[in-house]
């Protein structure tokens, strides 16, 4: 896999600086918030605050510049309490920790996962 954009949330907010490679290092710190709030008795709602830092490189080449990239953000987690699949929809807003002209200020992300 040459581009790891879809696999790493941290790089989604940094499209022009998306690291490429077949190796990666990723550190994620996330505080999750569980609620008793249900929408229409169908959907459970939760939240998260996160910090991601990572980099990617090709084997044998060593980690390249721009080095470590990171972001900080918040998100809402919505899951069906009537589904046997256990899939959650993640709505995240992330802001990169590094800023220059090639990096967007805010990134809105919508993903589905089987975990919080």
Image: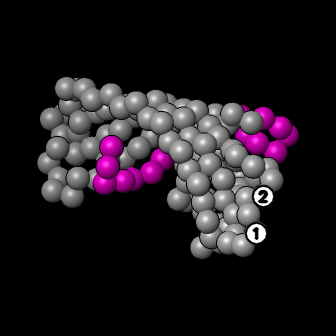
Instruction: Identify the coloring.
Output: one colour
Left or right: 46 as drawn, with respect to 14: left
The picture quadrant where one finds residue 114 is: bottom left
The picture quadrant where one finds residue 35 is: top left
Left or right: 71 as drawn, with respect to 68: left
- Above or below residue 63? Residue 82 is above
Task: Give the image location of residue 34, x and y in percent.
Answer: 27, 29
Q: Which residues are magenta?
A: 99-116
Left or right: 43 as drawn, with respect to 58: left
The picture quadrant where one finds residue 30 is: top left
Residue drawn where x is 17% and y is 53% of the image: 83
Residue drawn where x is 53% and y is 45% of the image: 27
- Above or below residue 57? Residue 27 is above
| Local SS, label 1 | loop
| Local SS, label 2 | loop
Left or right: 111 as drawn, with respect to 71: left
Residue drawn where x is 15% and y is 56% of the image: 84
- Above or below residue 9? Residue 107 is above
Residue drawn where x is 60% and y is 60% of the image: 24
Label disc, if present, on residue 61 of the rendered structure: 1
114 within the magenta span: yes
Label disc, if present, on residue 85 of the rendered structure: none
- Callout 1–callout 2 Cβ contact below 8 Å: yes
Task: Give the image location of residue 48, x and y in percent.
Answer: 41, 32
Task: Give the image location of residue 36, x and y in percent.
Answer: 19, 26
Packing grade of label 1 (10 A; few <14, some 14-19, many >=20) is few
Q: Is residue 98 something one can see in this rendering?
A: yes
Residue that numbered label 2 is attached to? 64
Instruction: Say which quadrant the C terminus sits in.
Output: top left
Q: Is residue 75 something one can see in this rendering?
A: no
Packing grade of label 2 (10 A; few <14, some 14-19, many >=20) is some
31 within the magenta span: no
């Amino acid at each position: 896999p040459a581009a790891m954009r879809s696999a790493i949330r941290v790089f989604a907010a940094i499209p022009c600086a998306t690291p490429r490679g077949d190796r990666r290092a990723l550190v994620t710190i996330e505080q999750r918030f569980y609620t008793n709030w249900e929408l229409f008795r169908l959907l459970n709602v939760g939240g998260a605050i996160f910090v991601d830092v990572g980099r990617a490189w090709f084997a044998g080449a060593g980690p390249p510049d721009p080095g470590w990239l990171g972001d900080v953000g918040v998100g809402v987690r919505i899951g069906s309490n009537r589904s046997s699949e256990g899939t959650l929809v993640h709505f995240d807003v992330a802001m990169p920790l590094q800023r220059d002209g090639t990096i967007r200020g805010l990134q809105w992300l919508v993903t589905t996962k089987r975990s919080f």
